[in-house]
């Protein structure tokens, strides 16, 4: 928990020196923010590119590929399912009927229908790093956001370069917003939830009371005045002082406060549903809006999780509930980025752990299926308005143009201005490591 005002060894002005100097971990794996800032200062000054960014949307549980971007109209009924394809704004490209908003902007999108490279494991790792959970743990592989933190650093020193919005979930491997791996805790994502946002206490003013802007900002100002008056900062190093500046930065607080948005913009994103779905992710759509606001504030990578897609039963009923919400939130994000002139600089990718079985089971659900999955991409200066690859008649395996998860990562790195074919980063033993093993961006997208 982050708590500037502590409970033991207080100064006469009420400030607890021990708790103030710690300034909490804020979800950085137990490493205090001053330690992180000190470690960053010991690294070479990163090359600062133009502010390009990536928003990664994880669908926990594995979305049904054959009910989304490639409806199998020629398959038997026990495989085909209940949904029909609809035309899109790109001639000859159809997607599932539950995504009418995205269909209307298909010229801004890329559907990948032949995604390979996942395992039958419920985990976010493959969607945030390109590696399975097993391989990530075995080889200590960093996520894309961690690499961006290390290679490109801060756009703004008061805003973390890597933010993970995924909250704690009943199934914990879905909760990971992206690992720092061999890059170390310095490049762990900032998590404005749990030990971060929900537990950040500023002299009895909690950040989850963001709707009361006047109270929150006056609380921050009061803390600054109290500390300046006591002279407490005079005895601490520059990194602790800088950490305090980061944590009380109105820029970061503002980015997390969707109440600052025009009501019409918030309405465009919709409200979704309250809370997490079962043991999965949150069903609210505000996280899509927060992701845009964070990128606008200077974040290079935002990861988030939406709902729960492990539909072993009632696949089509659950799809009718969840897919329209995703359709609204995702189309709003893309529209919002475009209206603000950000779409060419911000890549968006949406995908899940794996695909679903072609055959519908006795509970009207689809089970785990790792031979093929799907993805949807937008923005980032990519060549959009197309569908890449296809599966066979039954949706079992790629029919043509199999695309590996890591090919997508190579493309994302390339669009961020990183030479993915030549760039290496030293691991903890000083050995140079490539960002991914498959280092060829998709030629269709560049």
Image: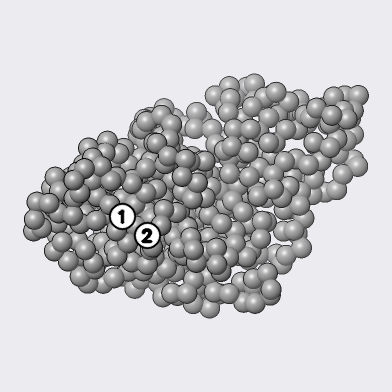
**On the rendered image, what quadrant is the C terminus found in?**
bottom left
Quadrant of image for the N terminus? top right
Whether residue 295 can be seen here = no
- The mark tally for this picture is 2
Which quarter of the figure has residue 82?
top left
**Could you tell me which residue is drawn at 70 percent across and 23 percent down?**
204
Left or right of residue 97, residue 271 in this image: right
Q: Up-down: is 261 above or below 124?
A: above
Residue 315 vs residue 117: left or right?
Answer: left
The kind of secondary structure element at disc 2 is loop
Q: Nearer the viewer, residue 372 or 301?
A: 372
Residue drawn at x 12%, y 51% as measured from the top left: 78
Vertical relation: 386 (above or below) 295: below
In the figure, residue 130 lies in which quadrant? Answer: bottom left
Local crowd size for mark 2, using a 10 Å CA cut-off: few (<14), some (14–19), many (≥20): some
Residue placed at 29% from the left, 63% from the top? 372
Please indicate whether residue 158 sits to the left or right of residue 435 in the image.
right
Depth check: 132 or 321 in front? 132
Q: Where is residue 85 in the image (x, y as percent from the top left)?
A: 14, 50
| Foreground residue among 365 and 391 | 365
Label 1 Cα crowd, 10 Å radius (few <14 / some 14-19 / many 20+): many
* Residue at which label 2 appears: 120
Q: In terms of sequence position, does the residue under pointer 2 or pointer 1 come before the other? A: 2
Q: Residue 263 carries which label?
A: none
How far is disc 2 from disc 1 in space, using C-alphas?
7 Å
The residue pinned by badge 1 equals 368
Q: Nearer the viewer, residue 119 or 428?
A: 119
| Residue 216 higher or lower than 240, as above or below | above
Q: Residue at x 52, y 41 (%)?
A: 168
Tag 2–tag 1 contact (CB < 8 Å): yes
x%, y% of residue 214? 63, 22
In the rendered image, is residue 60 in sight?
yes
């Amino acid at each position: 928990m982050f708590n500037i005002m502590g409970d033991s060894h207080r100064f006469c002005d009420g400030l607890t020196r021990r708790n103030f100097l710690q300034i909490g971990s804020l979800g950085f794996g137990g490493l205090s923010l001053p330690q992180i800032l000190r470690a960053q200062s010991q690294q070479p000054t990163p090359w600062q590119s133009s502010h390009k960014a990536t928003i990664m949307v994880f669908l926990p549980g594995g979305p049904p590929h054959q009910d989304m971007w490639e409806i199998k109209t020629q398959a038997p009924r026990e495989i085909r399912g209940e949904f029909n394809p609809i035309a899109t704004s790109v001639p000859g490209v159809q997607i599932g009927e539950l995504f009418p908003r995205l269909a209307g902007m298909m010229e801004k999108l890329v559907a990948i229908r032949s995604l390979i490279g996942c395992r039958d494991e419920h985990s976010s790792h493959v969607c945030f790093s390109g590696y399975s959970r097993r391989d990530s743990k075995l080889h200590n592989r960093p996520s894309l956001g961690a690499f961006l933190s290390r290679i490109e650093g801060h756009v703004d020193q008061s805003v973390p370069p890597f933010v993970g919005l995924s909250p704690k979930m009943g199934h914990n491997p879905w909760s990971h917003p992206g690992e720092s791996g061999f890059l170390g805790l310095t490049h762990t994502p900032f998590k404005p939830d749990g030990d971060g946002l929900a537990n950040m206490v500023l002299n009895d003013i909690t950040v989850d009371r963001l709707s009361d802007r006047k109270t929150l900002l006056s609380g921050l100002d009061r803390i600054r005045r109290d500390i300046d008056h006591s002279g407490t900062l005079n005895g601490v190093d520059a990194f602790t002082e800088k950490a305090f500046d980061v944590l009380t930065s109105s820029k970061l607080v503002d980015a997390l406060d969707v109440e600052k948005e025009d009501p019409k913009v918030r309405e465009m994103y919709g409200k979704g549903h309250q809370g997490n779905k079962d043991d999965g992710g949150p069903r609210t759509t505000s996280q899509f809006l927060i992701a845009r606001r964070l990128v606008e504030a200077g974040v290079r990578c935002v990861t988030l999780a939406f709902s729960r897609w492990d539909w072993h039963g009632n696949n089509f009923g659950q799809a009718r509930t969840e897919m329209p919400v995703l359709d609204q939130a995702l189309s709003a994000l893309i529209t919002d980025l475009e209206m603000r002139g950000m779409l060419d600089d911000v890549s968006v990718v949406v995908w899940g752990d794996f695909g679903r079985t072609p055959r519908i089971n006795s509970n009207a659900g689809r089970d785990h299926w790792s031979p093929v999955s799907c993805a949807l991409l937008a923005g980032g200066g990519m060549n959009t308005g197309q569908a890449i690859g296809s599966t066979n008649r039954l949706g079992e395996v790629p029919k043509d143009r199999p695309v590996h998860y890591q090919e997508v990562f190579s493309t994302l790195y390339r669009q961020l201005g990183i030479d993915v074919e030549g760039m290496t980063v030293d691991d903890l033993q000083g050995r140079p490591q490539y960002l991914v093993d498959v280092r060829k961006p998709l030629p269709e997208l560049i």
